[in-house]
Image (tube, rainbow, N blue to C red):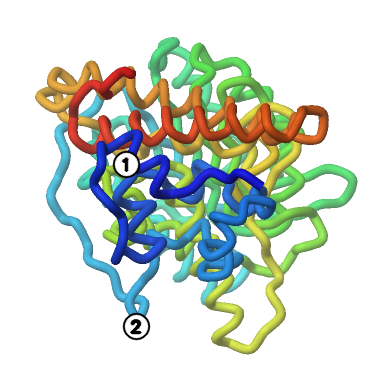
């Protein structure tokens, strides 16, 4: 069977430079291709990729985001230029007991500090609601105050604003999904109404509470990215996902493609992996399985598949500086091209069974080569060469 080989793609993209002597990880890195983008695990029929799959197996999505043996990471403390197009709402709900109260407070403080520092959020653009407010910049995490915050955002935001909503705490599910607040709770449907009233569709929701998986379907909509710590309402134990998500924001190895920025997908993958490792180390059965939904169909996935993950990959928690943005107009177009090509590859894979094998392989090879060129151009800051 004719196949798509790494050397064949490399020759087209890079001239005659051979890839002998490089392992599979280095070869794909050399081409600027990432396993997340190419969905390699769906291409088992390609003999040229068999060694890659054998080597990385089910960890392919985290291959470029591996921690060292101690799980340590290198914090990046440099503050970014303030980006006034970004907003965040952090809600730390009812804890139920002192141990959780301390945990939620630590995660919330770390999250707010990182948004203000590394990620360039304006201080007054980060709205914080907590169980027991300790300063003037916080509000109580009650249904009334949550509604007030979102009412204020209706006038603060515009169509180009990017809003992040972080829910840290406990959740419940009894016919309808809720996030536990101080006093009466708000349901997923009520949060959807609050989000739908905003002038922007660019919304990222991280519900990191127990039973949060039931928020996926009610919140799914065009332009939204929804991340939940659990896959359904039955996963009702206290979650650890928030801890590792916050860690991802300061971890150098969370930047899987090493482009200097953290995308929503990268943070999700990192937190998902470390959460699973936590249960493995503890010898416990995992009681949470995080989901991502960003194509509006209301069906979440545990990794980049089923049409989910493309928007999350192109949405960054941090921002380019003014200087970087001015110098990277071409890069922005290349990133859009990359997202388009990834979508075309996913669609082509979905049509595989209805296409002649030769036509499928030829089109897949063409898309791979084009994607490799775009990725290398992004890395080099140049326009890709044309045939």
Residue at 30% of width from left, 21% of height from top?
A: 332
**Residue at the image point whose x is 26% and y is 38% from the top:** 14
Give coordinates of residue 138: x percent, y percent: 38, 44
**Residue 183 visible in this rendered orientation of the protein:** no
Q: Which mark is residue 304?
A: none
Read off the residue under disc 2: 70
Find disc 1 in the rendering and name its residue: 137
Marks 2/1: CA distance? 36 Å
Task: Count neighbours of disc 2 (C-alpha within 10 A) and say few if under 14, some if 14 to 19, many if 20 or more.
Answer: few
Q: How many labels does the image show?
A: 2
Q: Is residue 293 visible?
A: yes
Place of residue 369 in the rendered image (x, y in percent of width and height, measured from the top left): 43, 33
Q: What element does badge 2 sit on?
A: loop
- Side of 246 where 21 appears, left or right: left
Q: In this view, does 288 lie to the left or right of 217?
A: left
Please name the residue shown 39% across and 61% down the image: 25
Reply above or below: 157 against 208.
above
């Amino acid at each position: 069977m004719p196949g798509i080989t790494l050397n064949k793609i490399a020759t087209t993209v890079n001239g005659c430079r051979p890839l002998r002597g490089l392992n599979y990880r280095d070869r794909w890195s050399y081409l600027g291709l990432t396993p997340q983008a190419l969905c390699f695990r769906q291409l088992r029929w390609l003999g040229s990729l068999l060694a890659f799959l054998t080597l990385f197996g089910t960890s392919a999505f985290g291959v470029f985001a591996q921690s060292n043996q101690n799980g340590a990471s290198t914090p990046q403390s440099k503050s970014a230029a303030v980006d006034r197009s970004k907003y965040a709402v952090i809600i730390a709900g009812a804890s139920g007991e002192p141990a959780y109260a301390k945990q939620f407070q630590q995660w919330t403080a770390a999250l707010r500090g990182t948004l203000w520092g590394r990620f360039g959020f304006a201080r007054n653009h980060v709205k914080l609601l907590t169980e027991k407010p300790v300063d003037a910049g916080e509000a109580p995490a009650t249904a009334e105050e949550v509604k007030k915050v979102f009412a204020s955002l209706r006038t603060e935001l515009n169509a180009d604003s990017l809003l992040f909503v972080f829910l840290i705490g406990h959740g419940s599910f009894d016919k309808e999904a809720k996030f536990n607040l101080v006093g009466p709770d708000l349901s997923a449907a009520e949060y959807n109404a609050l989000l739908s009233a905003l002038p922007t569709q660019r919304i990222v929701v991280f519900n990191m509470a127990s039973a949060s998986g039931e928020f996926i379907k009610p919140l799914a909509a065009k332009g939204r990215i929804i991340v939940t710590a659990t896959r359904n309402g039955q996963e009702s134990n206290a979650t650890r996902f928030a801890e590792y998500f916050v860690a991802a924001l300061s971890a150098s190895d969370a930047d899987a493609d090493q482009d200097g920025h953290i995308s929503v997908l990268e943070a999700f993958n990192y937190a998902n992996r470390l959460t699973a490792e936590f249960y493995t180390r503890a010898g416990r059965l995992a009681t949470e399985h995080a989901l991502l939904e960003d194509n509006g169909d209301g069906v979440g996935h545990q990794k980049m598949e089923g049409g989910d993950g493309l928007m999350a990959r192109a949405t960054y928690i941090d921002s380019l500086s003014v200087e970087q943005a001015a110098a990277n107009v071409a890069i922005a177009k290349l990133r859009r091209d990359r997202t388009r090509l990834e979508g075309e590859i996913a669609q082509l894979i979905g049509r595989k069974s209805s296409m002649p094998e030769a036509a499928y392989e030829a089109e897949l090879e063409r898309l791979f080569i084009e994607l490799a060129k775009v990725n290398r151009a992004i890395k080099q800051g140049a326009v890709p060469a044309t045939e």
